[in-house]
Amino acid sequence: MKRLLLLRTSYPTSSRLVATVVLAVLGVAITFTLTALDDSKLAGGAAIAIVIVGLSWLIGWSGQVSLGNSGFMAIGAYATAIWANHHTTTPIIFTLLLATACGAVGGLILALPSTRLRGPYLAGMTLAFSFAIAPLALNFPSLTGGSGGLFLNFLSAPTWFVNLFSGSQALIRANAQWTADVAIVVTAVAFFFMANLFHSRTGRAMRLVRDNDVAAELAGVNLQRTRTLAFAISAAYAGLGGSLLTLLTGSVTPQTYSLPLSILLLTLMVLGGIGTLSGAVIGGLIYSYSDNLVSLINKTTGISPTSTFGANLKGIVFGVLLILTMLLAPRGLVGMGSRLTSLVRRPARES
Amino acid sequence: MTEATPPPLTLAVEHVSVRFGGLTALNDVSFSIAANEIVGLIGPNGAGKTTAFNVVCGFLAPSSGTVRFPALGRENLKPAQLAKAGVARTLQGVGLFDHLSVIENVMAGAQSRPGGGFFTSLLGLPISSRREHLVRDEALAMLDRLGIARFAKALPGSIPYGIAKKVAVARALMGQPRLMMLDEPASGLDENELSDFASLISGLKDTMSVLLVEHNMDFVMPLVDRLVVLNFGQVIASGPPSVISHDEAVLAAYLGVEQ
């Protein structure tokens, strides 16, 4: 009995696979009920969720802070746009894998000097990287399109999928939903792999290094290799997210992937809950639908979206949410959820 | 003493000196540990015990001399190589991973074993899950052996100090070591826990050698086969506890007895 209780905490791969498929099917089913606009927003949120889970892995599991993940997104985004413009018939899966690999290589290169640094020094290093990406893109216009960026054919639904829809908006709805569905499936696959890592020897190595590096080394963990691997995986996920976002929007510009995006990613990760898969999903959803919240505030308070205050309202909302989360639920919305669950369960058990 | 072929040495520290700038922390220190032997490394504060431990573990490189592990066929190991080579070490205090449950802390001791590499982990291949289950079962059995299985799901911060120390030993044992290095195993333990710990360490002797640094002489004397006494970075005596306890140099230096 005691043994069973313990084993329950280690989910085998097959359970994770089933959970992934069920959740992906559920996500795809939900897209059928949404408007074209909400489907597009969901697709963007799914791409951001991939980046957040990679960041969560780096910060929550390996204990390394990065302000440079928007830079890794840029690497994935540019790799996608450059490749797609030269090879228009490449299957999307290949483009995504290529961008993921480019992100990983970028992470590996930055990790080599960075993993020797701790705390604010590491944050400073990744911050510098975050600042360097836009000027780098601007300095190689023949490759990156300069300040105007690059454009590519965004994802469009295949004919059989378009045929599922009817009416005057059929093509728009089909395309929006197709992109959302593709994004959901890619996110599900990325999350499945991350869940595997969480529950593996590799995942434990990260937590050992984070908690006590001397004891980790004595347990046979190579600190440098483990920290580098954490960076490379995080950057690979950022590359994948950037690639997906580029395929969804059909464009990439240097301004998109600058420091504010890195800060936003950190904020979303903290709001959802650091180091958790569900926290990353929540972060992605907040990203998707934060505009809805802002327009609701605009409507109820009468603040004009064109006023100076109104134009900055989104940033203010995120700031307030972040402060409230740090004060009331340091483990994010996921942590708050599990705390509420345990509070509800406790009286039931006691009675 | 009259054995024809002495057992192979597990550890041989040979003429090791460690200098920090002008300060000599260890000066031509030599000692060894035979198979299935319990050796205590003692000495007053600042004698160089922890430095000696750190040199053996590779946290410090010796300025001169060699640390050999003849039975393991290795020398001058780096910390991350210790576990794989068959050397385990506990840390002063408890040195547990605070955010990992007790069972996961113990599982960490098997981290250096093969299997469950990055790609098998990422893809969730059966071999990865199987390894995790095996290690988990083994860790639970280890906790059971030490009588602390009921704490398996607790976090280190929520368990008594004596239990946490046992968890640290359980973690070290998971590496199936040939040499166990215990850094102040008795510190912070009450009388009951001390006798419990002494019998635990005595039991290890059947399958491994043990090197321990300890201040508590009541704990060390009946436990070890041999003592190595350090003072001002030098070995001033070495031998069985019965001899050391009457050694004049030791009494003068370590116990502070006027001669």
Image (cartoon, coloured by chain):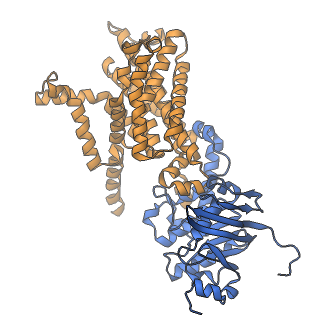
Closer-to-camera residue (B171/A135): A135
Q: Quadrant of residue B233?
A: bottom right
The image shows residue A309 at horizontal and vertical percentages of: 15, 28
* In the displayed structure image, the side of residue A161 where residue B199 appears, left or right: right
Q: Residue at x 36, y 49 (%)?
A: A338
* Residue at the farthest left position: A302
Q: Quadrant of residue A248?
A: top left
* In the displayed structure image, the side of residue A18 where residue A269 appears, left or right: left
* Residue at the farthest right position: B4
Quadrant location, the C terminus of chain B: bottom right
Closer-to-camera residue (A324/A150): A150
Q: Which chain is blue?
A: B
* Residue at the farthest front position: B22
Q: Residue at x 57, y 39 (%)?
A: A14
Q: Residue at x 36, y 9 (%)?
A: A170
Q: Which chain is orange?
A: A
Residue A342 visible at all:
yes
* In the displayed structure image, the side of residue A168 where residue A104 appears, left or right: right
* Number of dots carrying numbers: 0
* Residue at the farthest top position: A168
The image shows residue A210 at horizontal and vertical percentages of: 48, 50
Q: Is residue B149 above or below residue A193?
A: below
Q: Quadrant of residue A89?
A: top right
Closer-to-camera residue (B56/B171): B56
Quadrant location, the N terminus of chain B: bottom right
The image shows residue B146 at horizontal and vertical percentages of: 59, 70
Residue A39 visible at all:
no
Q: Is residue B234 above or below residue B70?
A: below
The image shows residue A289 at horizontal and vertical percentages of: 29, 28
